[in-house]
Amino acid sequence: MVHFKFFLAIVLCAIVSISHAGNPNKNYTVKYIEDKSGDCYPMNINIKVTPTKIYAENTSSGSKYWDCQYLGKIEKTDKGVTFYYHKYYLTNKQVYFIISDDKIMKYRGTFYHIILFDGEIQYAL
């Protein structure tokens, strides 16, 4: 009976981990936007990224969303280090939305995801 309970616990853990693996929906909070001169301005914009839509809350014009198409994972190598990004195409704005897979930018002691969107560089948690 003890072996059955142990086996059942392992199966339940496996089911839970599989159900969460590969979840394409991601949530980020944009904390800073960098302008063309390299100055950063604080923000607090919540973003939810799905394979077909990108939602933004707390923007200057309220909440909004864009239809998008997920174009896959891309890799860029800089000085011998490879970084991975997710690339989306916003069909109604006709621009790309690219976000780093990992937190790769350090600003004020904290590492952030980099988002490239419509000519802006954004730092997100």
Image: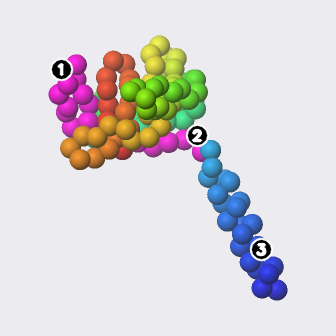
Q: Can residue 97 be seen in this view?
A: yes
Asked if residue 54 is among those painted magenta in the image, a careful observer would answer no
Place residue 122 in its image quadrant: top left
Q: Do the residues labelled 1 and 3 touch (CB within 8 Å)?
A: no
Q: Distance between the residues labelled 2 and 1?
A: 34 Å
Q: How many labels does the image show?
A: 3
The dot on residue 7 is 3
Relative to 111, 10 lies left or right: right
Name the element at disc 1.
loop
- Label 2 amino acid? Pro
* Left or right: 23, with 49 as reference point: right
Q: Residue at x 47, y 37 (%)?
A: 101
Residue, disc 2:
24
Residue topped by disc 1: 37
Specify the amino acid type for callout 3.
Phe
Q: Quadrant of residue 115?
A: top left
For marks 1 and 3, the one nearer the N-term is 3
Q: Give the residue drawn at x 49%, y 16%.
A: 92
